[in-house]
Each structure stands twice: as C-alpha cells, then as structure tokens.
Image: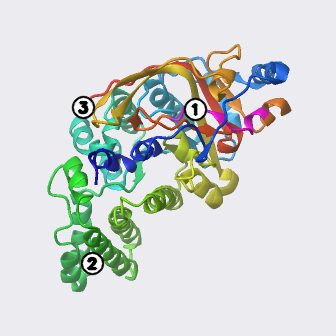
Amino acid sequence: MTRRKAVIIPSVLLSLSALTVATPAMGATTHGSPVPTPKVSVSWQRGESVVAGIDRSSHTLRTTNPTGSLRDLDALGRMLKGAEVVGLGEATHGSRDFFRMKHRVFRYLVEEKGFRTFSLELPWSSGVRIDEYVVQGKGNLNDIAREEFQGAYRIWNNQDYIDLITWMRDYNLHHPGDPVRFMGDDMGYAGPELYARVINYVSLKYPQLLQKVTQLYRGLAPTTDAATFSEEYVKLPLAERQQRAERTREVYDLLRAQRPGPGDKQEHLWMTQHALAIHQMARGFAFDLNDEDQIAQIMKLRDQVMAENVEWWRRHTGNKILLSAHNTHVSYDSFDTRYPKTQGSFLRDALGSRYASIGFTFYKGSFKAFGTDDNVIRTYHVDAAKPNSNEQILDQARREDYILDMRTAPEPVRKWLDKERATWNIGAGWPDPVEYTTALGKAHDILIHLHNIQATTYLGAS
C-alpha cells in the first residue's frame, strides 16, 4: 500500500472525498464521467426566472445559532410533515454553520415535532457511550470525546458537537421521563466495551456458550486507542481480516439463534445488535483495500449498514430520528459511481415518504479537513462558487440564507434543479482532485442554502 493510500484509507469510512483523493487525479466528473465546461447561454432569461422562482418559494433562515427563537423553522416543520427519519446533510465535514444548524434543527424537532434521537456517522460503540452520557450522565463528556472522536472520526471533536451533546444532557435533566438519545450508526470501529458487554451477557444468560464466544472473540477487542487500532487493523493480511469477520459473524449468529427467557427480550435484542455492530466493523474491513471495485463494495456496504442501524433504532425505540451525515450519505442520488448506493436511498426504500432528505449548499467559506498528503487537520478556504454551478445560481436569490422545498418549487426551479451542475462536495480530505456534480432536486427533498460559512473550532490534536 502506498503512503498516500495508507494515510487516507482510515478516512474511507468517513466520507467519499477521503476515498477519491486516494485514486488518480481526474477532472470534473458527472457520476464518474467527464463534464463539459458549462456555457453561459440561454441568455439567462431562464436563469432569471429560476432565481425569481427561488425568491417566491424560499423561506428566510434568520440564523444558524441554536439558541433563541425557532420561529423561522416553522416552514421547515411543515415541509417535514409525516417524516420519521430526517437526513440532514453537510457540504463540508468541518464547518460550524452546518453543525450549529443541525443543533438548531434538532432542538426544533425535539420541541415541536416529538423527535427524540440524534444519529451521527460515528461508530455504534461510540454512540452507546455518548447515549449513556446524555441519558444517565455516565462519564465525562470531554474524556468521551477525546477517546471516541479519533482517527477518521476526530473531525467530530469540535466545539459545536460538544455544545449539542451538552444541550442534550441538559434537556434530559429537565425531562427525565422523556429523554432525547444519541446513536452512532457507522461501522468504522467497535470499542472494547462492546465485546465485554456481549461476553458478560453470554456468561449470565447462556453460560453453555461462554467458552465458544470467548474463543471466537479472543484477540479481537482493541487494546490501544481507537486511532492506532484502526491504523493497525487495515495493515493486517487480507486473509486474517476475512477470518476475523467469520469469527464475529459466528458470534452474532449464535446470539441471534438463542431464545430469550421471560423478561429478557429487550436485553437480548440489544446485545444481539451489539454483536452485529462488532461484525459490521470486521466485515467492512474484510475487503481488498487495493482493489477499486472492492472499495466501491465497501462504500455500498457502509451506507447499507448505516441505514439498517438507523431503521433498527427507529423500530425498537419508537423514536423519530434526525440523521446527521454528509450530503452524499443522506441523499437519494450518489454523487459518484464509486459510491454505488447511498444511505438515503436505502432509507427511502425502507421508509418511503417517512424519510426526508435535507441537503446543504453554500457559496463560499472555510472548513476544517484532513490534508490529503499528510492527514493533518487544518483550516481551508474556498472563494466564490464557480460560474454556473448550483451554488453560484442559488446565491443570486435575494435572501442570503434560506430554506427551499424543492418538491413544491415553481416549475422552472424544479426543471433547473433536475439537471446536473458542478457543486461543492467537500468531505474529510482536502484538496480533492475531483469536481463533483449533482442534480439537487434528485438528491434531496429540501435545500438549506448559506451564503458564507466558517470553520468549526476543532478541539482535538491535529
């Protein structure tokens, strides 16, 4: 494996852009195909009508600050009627305005629409620890963030997410009988406490299986920090990684085959899901990371797993969920052929109109990202959006920041939204040699456009 791939592969499990920087540089792509340079023709009479249509049908967004009045989000609430899972994207993985807006939208959905879970593209085991903090007050948030927001996930160790989780804990202190919850839906890591929970459960409920399960899990639980574990895991021989996945699958199958005793159904359900999360991690790394086709299979599996974990949580908790991820994950339409099917597409298959996708766009601004040559987190800045890109036209509207229901926009706007154009699609790694395109109206239901964004305050080590 080359140095470039060795640096980026741990971030493959965080975003599309982290993957693409590990591949040969290419020009603009339309789902993997070259894009011709946009031409400013059609006299922009149509463009003027598009902008006028956006002006007529969009709703002013007054702030991204999560505190204070939420009245300007009432329009968004009407757009989300009937939704039980709302996917809220981000056009970068490191801008405070996206994170603060997620906090703000979650607060609105909790207070006005009965939502109770915030889901993040974070490992299941990390989500379990944060959930126990927000519900029970277990542990210290700064310690949890330092220990769980590591490796590819360290971008989440920022002030904005700390503020959100702190708000969730405070909400629960005031509403102990109706708590909000936190879940991680991703498969990039499984912490040692997850293995311990499964083994302890087996020892209490199915002691006849203890020796078998202990043997299958022997040597698999992390003994280092999360970042070191992930870096070392991908260096293991492919055959060993595949054999580990077989062992974790066998534990999951053993638990799933057991019949819980009276009163044990819920505990058995959760422990079986914990065993599945362990297997999801092992299965995700049981691919050949030097094979582009295999990497595409990883990306499809990852989005399928994230969707299935969210749907499992919805079914078994009864909670309505705000799902936080990159635009690419919450969308219906992949931005790239190397990303075969998205989490949003899987959720639409499962839930139909009970899933709604909200995408973010922005005109210019700054963000934190991994350097694609050295994996160091730093602040980057992009200037005004390119001519004839989605963002350049969207930003011509008279409102700087606004919410647009693309399903009910005027016909000229819908037609414009259904055509692919260059778009900002900044993931974990930067710079990214790929210029992405998307048809926004096919990717999401609702759009939140921001004129200018600022980088988040990163709290971890570079």
Please name the predominant secondary structure of the magenta segment in the image.
loop
Classed neighbour count for the residue bearing mark 3: other residues with Cα under 10 Å, few (<14), some (14–19), many (≥20): few
* Direction from residue 376 to residue 260 in the image, left or right: right
Is the residue under label 2 in contact with that under label 1 (CB below 8 Å)?
A: no
Q: Position of residue 44 (x, y in %)?
A: 81, 20
Disc 3 or disc 2, which is closer to the eye?
Answer: 3
Q: Amino acid at mark 3?
A: Ser
Rendering quarter of residue 295? bottom left
Could you tell me how far apart the alpha carbons at marks 3 and 1 are, in whole angstroms? 26 Å
The residue wearing badge 2 is 205
The residue wearing badge 1 is 360
Q: Position of residue 19 (x, y in %)?
A: 42, 47
SS class, disc 1: strand
Between discs 1 and 2, the one toward the N terminus: 2
Could you tell me how far apart the alpha carbons at marks 3 and 2 are, in whole angstroms? 44 Å
Please say if 184 is above or below 449: below
Q: Position of residue 307 (x, y in %)?
A: 52, 56
